[in-house]
Image (cartoon, rainbow, N blue to C red):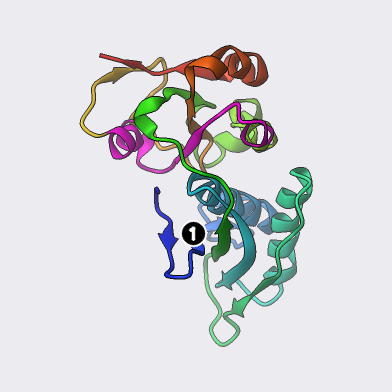
Amino acid sequence: MRNAMQLSNGFIVTTDNSGAIGEKEQDVVQVPDDVTSYYSARVTLLEQWAAGAEPEAIVMHNFSSESSWGRYVKGITQLFDELSLPVPPIKGSSETNMPTLQSGIAITMIGAPVRTLTDVKKLHWFTYGKPLVGNELLEHPEYIANLLFVKKALDSNIIGRIWPVGSKGIHSEVRSLLGDVSFLSSLDCKKTAGPATVILLGISEEQVKSAEQHFGQLLEPIVFL
């Protein structure tokens, strides 16, 4: 698993946070609160999928303001609606005692394992999407890995494993997944991929052609040396 925690009862816990991204005057990236929560939930959900799980409950920590809560819920709901998935129950807490100068949110998901994880060394690995961060997400949405495509590919067994790429970039994630390997990619492998705009996909030999047709031009093979 990537950054997931497996509890003794088998449940999977994943989390993501965003700071200085939102509607406050001193936020570094100015976007609506629902956009912030959408992308934070996206990362947390991808971590669930990487662990072979589907979320059953969501805990949200809101450091922005009480008024931000509804907008954050809206973004999370939008993500699950786009994937035709039921929205898990959402509970949590808001900071109401102290006014903050910048936005802050953390989203935790608790899920149950539903998929068997294939051995990573038995799969061919690809990148899907391009690394984007900050305002680049708003400027180039066409380069962001499409989660609906990923969900459909998981459900139809076109892909065997997924591994989201975050702030440390493709190079770091490939090393975390496969060890000290050397590889080539046409993408900037040291650049942050923000809220997992790039996903590593593990695909079996017999499913490679189906995956190429399903994902299109954003799917690129990782060439190992």
Q: Which residue is painted at 60% across and 48% down in the image?
A: 42
Q: How far across and how far down the image is residue 154, in percent?
A: 62, 35
Q: Is residue 59 visible?
A: yes
Name the one closer to the observer, 187 or 127: 127
Q: Is residue 170 visible?
A: no
What residue span does the magenta drawing correspond to? 152-178
Name the one closer to the observer, 156 or 175: 156
Q: Residue furthest left?
A: 180
Q: Is residue 46 above or below residue 140?
A: below
- Label 1 Cα crowd, 10 Å radius (few <14 / some 14-19 / many 20+): many
Q: Residue furthest bottom?
A: 97
Q: Which residue is painted at 67% across and 77% down in the image?
A: 66
The reply, left or right, for residue 204 in relation to residue 37 is left
The total of numbered circles placed on residues is 1
On the image, which quarter does residue 72 sit in? bottom right
Residue 169 falls within the magenta-colored stretch: yes
Q: Which residue is painted at 41% across and 15% down in the image?
A: 186
Q: How far across and how far down the image is residue 161, in percent?
A: 49, 35
Q: Is residue 93 above or below residue 55?
A: below
Q: Which residue is mark 1?
A: 14
The reply, left or right, for residue 155 in relation to residue 207 is right
Q: Quadrant of the C terminus?
A: top left
Mark 1 element type: strand
